[in-house]
Amino acid sequence: MRSHPVQTAGRAAALTLILAVVALLPVAASGARGRAQRPQLAAAASPAAIVARLSTAQLAGQRIIDAYGGLTPPASLLRAIRAGEVAGVIFFGPNVSSPVQLRGVIAQLQRANAAGPVRAPLLMLTDQEGGLVRRLPGAPALSERQIGASAAASALAAAAGSGAAGTLRAVGINVNLAPVLDVFRAPGNFIDRFQRSYSSSASVAAALGSAFIAAQQHAGVAATAKHFPGLGAATASQNTDERPVTLPLSLSALRTIDEAPYRAVIAAGVRLVMVSWATYPALDPRRPAGLSQQVIGGELRGRLRFRGVTLTDGLGAGALSAFGGFARRGVLAAQAGADLLLCSVLVPQDNTPANGLAALGGIQAGLARGTLDRASAQQAAARVIALRASL
């Protein structure tokens, strides 16, 4: 996710399949995760019933996280939401003039969603990491670097998680694209220069990320661990928002350092994981991680056994310049196993629902042609709808 500083998922067969998938989703627990992960509906009937009756366009729509430029949601976005063809909306700095303004916008979007086929809240997302990377004024004030350098790091990480939740819940945002779990290698590199890494130690990043996640999800906002399998080795000039990036790390380094914090936060119940746009030759020499089945299906779902919701970074990233437009990129990400597609571009003012519509069209066409597996799409929709219903 961009680091610009901001101040201040016959019918009987389908039903059986989806019931089995939803049963694998993270289950709510009392205590640290209870409020953020309310128990699923009895027998998980609601997500399965919804998925079974979705049209192809609506099934595709459960993958779409839309974006727009400016302070007012376009009519085209409201129409897509009412039609059930959008799962959520991501907000950037240009979408926010004040907490009061954003709260009104979110209420408007959720009212539009009430007319759609999915009787669960839209996902409302933003980056409220702390320090320089905040879309809203308020907590968390400290950056990850500042927290990691403190003698009271664990307490401060938990306070940052609860503080982020308080800031976001006040305006109706229910998903935070935080914390960053990248284990930085060199001071001033791509992640460290905006103070977005807790530590150069994988164990410290794991512990502090887990504390942030537990506190935030306890307070009712879903957390997102990013950027899997890790951007901590990227140099200052290796920005995936702007250009293709290859990180030639050994498989041993990736698994013992970069992926290590994910093992901890998955055990702690993190709801979402964002996959990076860098290419990791040790895992897949041909495609960026977010377009790679080896990375999402093999490492994240297979090796680390993550059962929550996977999502891409912004589909408009320069790292994807060799992979066509939003329609093609969306299909490739879905084939790789991404549940949600962030349909945003590098310059937030240039965001438009047309990008989400293009990705939707690509997914819909792939389902119609059979280049995308419908059962897999139903599984993804079930995970997304279960997440929506829990918030």
Image (cartoon, rainbow, N blue to C red):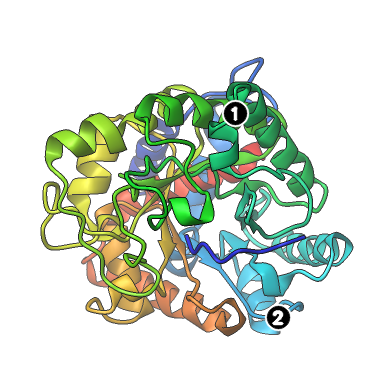
x and y, in percent, of residue 263 in the image: 35, 27
Which kind of residue does numbered mark 1 sit on? Ser
Q: Is residue 84 above or below residue 139?
A: below
Q: Residues within 10 Å of mark 2 (few under 14, many from 20)?
A: some
- Judge left or right: residue 284 versus residue 22: left
Which circle marks residue 264 in the picture?
none
Looking at the rendered structure, which numbered label has been put on residue 150? 1
Q: Nearer the viewer, residue 368 or 312?
A: 312
Residue 391 shows in the view = yes
Mark 2: amino acid: Gly
Q: How crowded is mark 1: few (under 14 residues within 10 Å), some or many (20 or more)?
A: few
**Among the 4 quarters of the image, the one containing residue 42:** top right
Identify which residue is drawn at 66% across, 48% down: 120
Q: What element carries label 1?
A: loop
Q: Can residue 365 be seen in this view?
A: no
Q: Which residue is drawn at 66% across and 15% down?
A: 31
Tell me how many marks there are.
2
Q: In which quarter of the image is the C terminus?
A: top right
Q: Which residue is drawn at 63% across and 56% down?
A: 132
Q: Where is residue 74 in the image (x, y as percent from the top left)?
A: 69, 82
Q: Mark 2 points at which residue?
A: 70
